[in-house]
Amino acid sequence: MSKIRIATTSLAGCFGCHMSFLDMDERLVGLLEYVEFDRSPLTDIKHCQPCDIGLVEGGLCNAENVHVLREFRQQCKILIAVGACAINGGVPAMRNHYTVQECLEEAYLNGVGVDNPMIPSDPELPLLLSKVHPLHEVVRVDYYLPGCPPSGDAFFTILSDLLAGKEPSLPKAMLHYD
Amino acid sequence: MSNTLFIDGQEIPFAPGQTIMDASLEAGIYIPHLCHKPGLTPHGSCKLCTVEVDGRSVSACTLPAAAGMKVDNNTPALQEVRKTLVQMLFVEGNHLCPTCSKTGDCTLQALGYHFGMLDGHFPPFYPRREVDASHPDLVLDRDRCVLCELCVRASREQDGKNVFAISGRGASAHIIVNTSSGKLGDSDLTLDDAAAHICPVGAILPKNHGCEVPFGRRTFDLHSVAESDVAHVGLQKTEHHDE
Ligand code: SF4
Ligand code: SF4
Ligand code: FES
């Protein structure tokens, strides 16, 4: 039997959800009997090939995020928005109170401890969006896994349910937005 | 006819003058509510207590109970509509729970859990609203205000003061402080006032005590807002009844 292919990525997130994914601990070993990883920080594959499941951590703060998200949506049969940032912008969306210019000035010119103040302008840097946005504003999302981050148990539940061909669900006591 | 009404078929008593909400609270039946607190004049603004009486949608917190009244409360359709109201409250403000020290103790969030809300569904507004940190003991963060007027009523009816009011209409409605500077620090609000603690969300918060109870050990981490939640929440993005 061919394995289920999973791709994961972190957009405007902190990799906390990925760390929590690893909190499945030894259950990951069992999982690897049934799944293999495509594009993911765990494999360092740069472009997503056709996959069964895509796990996307983080919201959209720049043009590259939008590009990667579209690639994931195109390649993954099932797309899961993982964590608070993917679902409503989360901590990065705190910058939505300010203009991009104000953010850049605070980070690169006027911030505490800034050496050699200068706003980066390398053309290779992806352009910032004027606001941080959740995934569902740009693509269709199949499942949500709330939490900041979702627990290792929550990851294990949604993946085991999907592998068993069941509609995934969480006990209400496991649902949290923080 | 005796003074009883029926909530989802269950017969419960009421005293003359009681609302549907008063009677159900006394009988231990949960009707979701956010802008209602027993002891304060009902406000009827959040509409989370929407129930159906003879096929008409009414607010349980404001409608007086009547003998023989048949109230539909815990129906799948009403739960769906209430969930949508919570989603609208989330996207209208800036509800980034991981950044909010009310998280775990917040009634709005607990209602989201209760209805199995996964996302805000609607595009978020990300409004720009003002924070007032001028008070030595309290902070007013308008980002999270849901305009329930609990603070307005508690200040007037329980504290005998008049610290808060709502100003503006529709999307520009916002909470204001009744001082000439408009600053909380110039008001007579004190930490032991009812109005300082009544906010159901993280809009009025005590300073310096935000992290005394760790995340995961707070009220609604350990209890449901209805204390009757054992159901599972499906994680699928299903079609929204709004579409
Ligand atoms: S007020 Fe409640 S719902 Fe809003 S961010 Fe704070 S915890 Fe979340
Ligand atoms: S500050 Fe809190 S209590 Fe006052 S109206 Fe806003 S949400 Fe309600
Ligand atoms: S609780 Fe009745 S309208 Fe808010």
Image (tube, rainbow, N blue to C red):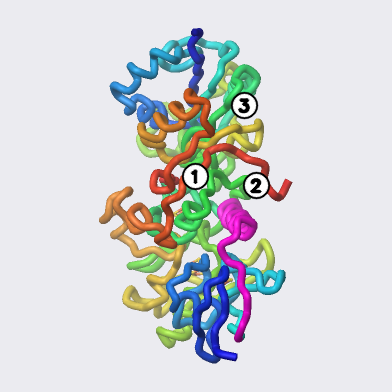
**Spatial distance from mark 3 to mark 1, Cα to Cα?**
29 Å
Q: What residue appears at the point 51 percent right and 58 percent down from the top-left corner?
A: B144
Q: Are marks 1 and 2 in contact (CB under 8 Å)?
A: no
> Is B69 included in the stretch rendered in magenta?
yes
The mark found on residue A66 in the picture is 3
Q: Chain of mark 1?
A: B
Residue A39 visible in the picture: yes
* Residues flagged by tags 1 and 2 on a common chain: yes
Q: What residue appears at the point 38 percent right and 70 percent down from the top-left corner?
A: B197
**Spatial distance from mark 1 to mark 2, Cα to Cα?**
20 Å
Crowding near pointer 2: few (<14 within 10 Å), some, many (20+)? some
Would you place residue A40 above or below residue B189 in this image?
Answer: above
Q: Amino acid at mark 1?
A: Val
> Which span of residues is magenta-colored?
B67-91
Q: Amino acid at mark 3?
A: Val
Question: Percent position (x, y) of residue A172?
Answer: 43, 47
Q: What residue appears at the point 34 percent right and 18 percent down from the top-left corner?
A: A30
Which image quarter holds the N terminus of chain B? bottom right
Q: Is mark 3 within 8 Å of ligand 1?
A: no
Which residue is label 1 attached to? Answer: B233
Question: Percent position (x, y) of residue B56?
Answer: 71, 71
Question: Percent position (x, y) of residue B24?
Answer: 49, 75
- Please tell me in which quadrant of the rendered image residue A28 appears: top left
Which residue is label 2 attached to? Answer: B122
Seen from the viewer's position, the closer of residues B158 and A28 is A28
